[in-house]
Amino acid sequence: MSTIRVRFAPSPTGHLHIGSVRSAIFNWLFARHHKATFLLRIEDTDIQRSTQAFLDSQLASLAWFGLMPDEPIVYQLSRQEEHLKAARRLIDEGKAYPCFCEPREADEVIHALEQGAGAKYSGKCRNIAPEERNMQKPHAIRFKLPDSLSTVTFKDVILDTVSVSTDQLDDYVIIRRDGTPIYNFCVVVDDISMKISHVIRGQDHVSNTPKQVLLYRALGEQEPLFAHIPLILGPTGAKLSKRDASVSVEEYRAQGYLAEALFNYLVRLGWSHGDDEVFTRDQLVEVFDLDHVGKKGSIFDSKKLQWLNGVYLRASSSEKLLGSLDLIDPVYRKNLEAAWSATELDALLTLYKERAVTLIELYTAVHGCAAEPTAHDVSLIAKWQTAQTPAMLQAFIDQASALAVFDHDALAACGNAVCAEFATKLVALAQPLRLALTGGTVSPGVFDIMAILGKERSLARVQVLCDALV
Ligand SMILES: [Zn+2]
């Protein structure tokens, strides 16, 4: 087993965001590619905003993608004693100190900023000798920025070397006055404990990294190798937001996107392998590495995702499609199986998946043509309707009812013969037939549908429209 260990660390304060899950995918692929370990840590220390419902939703989304960790899930909140222990160790070693200052009010900070003093901590408690500290008094714990340090430099697989001046830092709080550790501190203590070798996460974390690097070094550990991946952007070039597109995995699942398609789409946002677009998971495991991750943000393209979903729908067997529908809501499969025989259902799914974009669209179409259309919207065929349309439909019914074999080719021959007889194009017959059969004028080949519905059901539907048009 490789010593490479990576983790995905979401906070259960909302449904899983697609930007977040792309980080999970990159971590997972990197781990699989290197035969390494993929871990999951739930950062649930924000007890105001973390909920069990969001946690369940996020775990369901990860399971949907097949991104399960190789070791038991680590819950950050359960490690608070470890965080405090690490902070006390830093105090003992003179690398952190208790700060007894009252928290500054917002207007005090604003005043300080106006005076040009910045919002930085004054350093008031930095030099209180250990024996003079009254540890009974409420206090926060601050990290003591090393005196001689002027820049913090760290290696990043994607951004190369990143250097930040310590002018931008102050003695930052690691444990709040209420005894809870801050984010940057928990992350470091936990990543050390979980022996994480590579931290692969979004570029929105770059600004946290200098503080974290200093904490690794203070704790006597080599920092991991960082890989800050570019953000997913909306069409305006700003970070993708709810206004641009659906942003939670849960929404895409409910809309009828296949996990494989969304997975494939998200991998290609920020990573490339030549001009290839469609990959099986095994192919991705084989070719994925961090050296082909770009530096710049990638624009989310709903159209391309739709195209890719269509590719995956067409490649899926009927059984697989029904299984995927089941994952959205078991009622879909039940409805289809109540409406169609197994053979009919397979034939319809095969026919309709050729043009469907989502599973829900596919379901709606296949389920929709089970019911005999009741009221026809004849305005849909106004373009093709003439005085001879009823007679033409009747001629088609008469000839088709005499067919010994009611299949696509026989029906097509019959349709062509009727059109020749009425000196019209096939579309002038096909569109009224579509309306009669499905209630609409957009569907797969009309003779294919008739062959699946069978002679009796098909011709009865055509007769209803024919009678209505007379
Ligand atoms: Zn202080």
Image: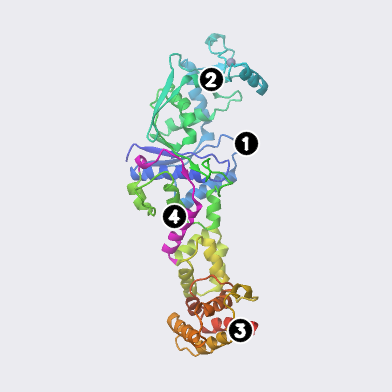
The tag earlier along the polypeptide, 3 or 2, is 2
Indicate the quadrant where residue 389 lies.
bottom right
Q: Is any atom of residue 70 visible in this view?
A: no
Mark 2: C-beta under 8 Å from nearest atom of ligand 1: yes
> Residue visible at 60% across and 23% down?
177
Q: Amino acid at mark 1?
A: Gln
Please tell me whether mark 4 sits on a helix, a strand or a loop. Answer: helix
| Residue of label 3 | 387
Residue 131 coordinates in the image, percent (x, y): 54, 9
Task: Using a 10 Å C-alpha cutoff, classify the residue at mark 3 as few (fewer than 14 neighbours), some (14 to 19) or many (20 or more).
Answer: few
| Residue of label 2 | 142
Please tell me whether mark 2 sits on a helix, a strand or a loop. Answer: strand
Q: Amino acid at mark 2?
A: Arg
User: Cβ–Cβ below 8 Å for labels 4 and 2?
Assistant: no
- Tell me the distance, in whole angstroms, between the alpha carbons under discs 3 and 4: 50 Å
| Residue of label 1 | 48
Residue 396 coordinates in the image, percent (x, y): 53, 86
In the rendered image, which quarter contains the N terminus?
A: top left
Task: Using a 10 Å C-alpha cutoff, classify the residue at mark 2 as few (fewer than 14 neighbours), some (14 to 19) or many (20 or more).
Answer: many
Task: Using a 10 Å C-alpha cutoff, classify the residue at mark 1 as few (fewer than 14 neighbours), some (14 to 19) or many (20 or more).
Answer: few
Q: Which residue is at the far front?
A: 423
Q: Is residue 312 magenta?
A: yes
Which one is nearer the viewer's eye here, 390 or 183?
A: 390
Which residue range is magenta in the image? 289-317
